[in-house]
Amino acid sequence: MNPTGFWTSPMLRWVAAAMVVFNGFFPAVWILFTSLKTEAELVQKPITWWPANPMLDNYVRAFTDQPLLTYLKNSLLVATGATVLSLLVAACAAYAIARLNLKRRELILTCIVASSMFPLVTLLVPIFETMRALGWLNTYIALILPYVVLNLPVCTLVLVSFFQSIPRDLENAAMIDGCTRLQALWLVVVPLAAPGVFTAGILAFVNAWDEFLLALSLNSSPAVRTLPVGIALYQGEFTFPWPIISAALIVAIVPVAILIALFQERVVGGLTQGGLKG
C-alpha cells in the first residue's frame, strides 16, 4: 500500500474530521445531559448517558439561586463594549501598519505578537492598582479597558492581513473624490475587509465573555459581576450542585453559540482567507 496515498485518503480525512467534531461537541453535549439530571442520578453507577427523566428544574434553580440574568446582562455589556472598542482601535492600528510607510514595520508586528504572550496573572497587580487609583473598581469600565488591551494584538494581526490584500487604488480613488484618509478607512477598507472584521470581533467577544481572573479581581460587587464569576458562586463550601452549574453553563454557552451560528460563514471565510493572505 502506498503510504502517501493512505495519509491523503478521504477515509482518513473523514476520521480526522469526526475526531475534531467529537472533541468539540462532546463536552457541551455532556454538560447538557448533566443539566437535565438529578444529583442522585448523576452519581449513580453505572453511569447513565441519557437522563432517565429529563427535567428543567435545574434551569429554574440556576436563575433563582443566583441572579443569573444580572450576570448575563453584565457580561453582555462588558463583552460588547470591549469588542467595539477593540475593533475601532485595532482597525486604526492595522491600517497604519498595512498602509503607512512605517520604519521597522516587522519589529512592530513582532512586538505586537510578543505582547500577547504575557500570562494574564503577571498583569493582574498593575491592572488592579491602576483601576484602584482611578477609582474604577466595581465598574464596567474596569473590565472593558483591560479587555480591549488584551484583545488588541490578535485583532490587529487579523485585520493587518486583510487590509494588505485590498488594492490601494480603491482608497486613492475615494480620496480623489474628496474623502480623507480616515474616511477612506471606514467607508472603503473596513467594508471590503468585512470577513476579517467579523473574525476579529468574534474572537474579541468570546475572549471577553469567557474571562475569569480579571472579572473576579476587579469587580467584587454583585451588581457588576459577570457570568464566569457568577457561575463559580453556585458551589458551596461542601457542596457542588453540578446539575445546576451545568444548567448555568448551558445558559452561558447559548449567546456565543447563537453569535457564531449567525456569522459562521463570515468567520470561517475570515479565518481561511486570513490564513492564505497572511
Image (cartoon, rainbow, N blue to C red):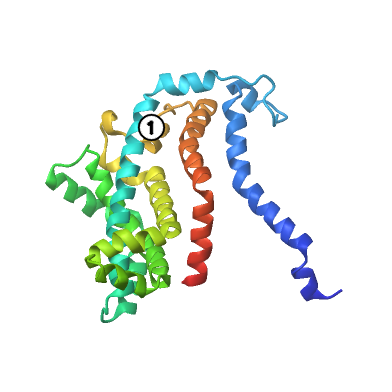
In which image quadrant can residue 68 be found?
Answer: top left
Name the side, left or right, on which 32 lies relative to 256.
Answer: right
Split into 4 quadrants, where in the image is the N terminus? bottom right
Q: Residue at x 38, y 26 (%)?
A: 69
Q: Amino acid at mark 1?
A: Leu
Q: Nearer the viewer, residue 234 or 265?
A: 265
Q: Give the vertical position of 2 relative to 85 (above or below).
A: below
Q: Position of residue 3 (x, y in %)?
A: 80, 74
Q: Which residue of the protein is positioned furthest toward the front in this rendering? A: 177
* Place of residue 19 in the rendered image (x, y in percent of width and height, measured from the top left): 68, 53
> In this orientation, does residue 118 appear?
no
Q: Residue at x 77, y 75 (%)?
A: 4
Instruction: Name the one closer to the observer, 263 or 252.
Output: 263
Q: Position of residue 119 (x, y in %)?
A: 36, 58
Viewer can see residue 224: yes
Q: Position of residue 63 (x, y in %)?
A: 43, 22
Secondary structure found at label 1 = helix
Residue 140 versus residue 121 in the image, above or below: above
Residue in the picture at 75% in, 69% down? 7
In the picture of the structure, the residue carrying the numbered disc 1 is: 72
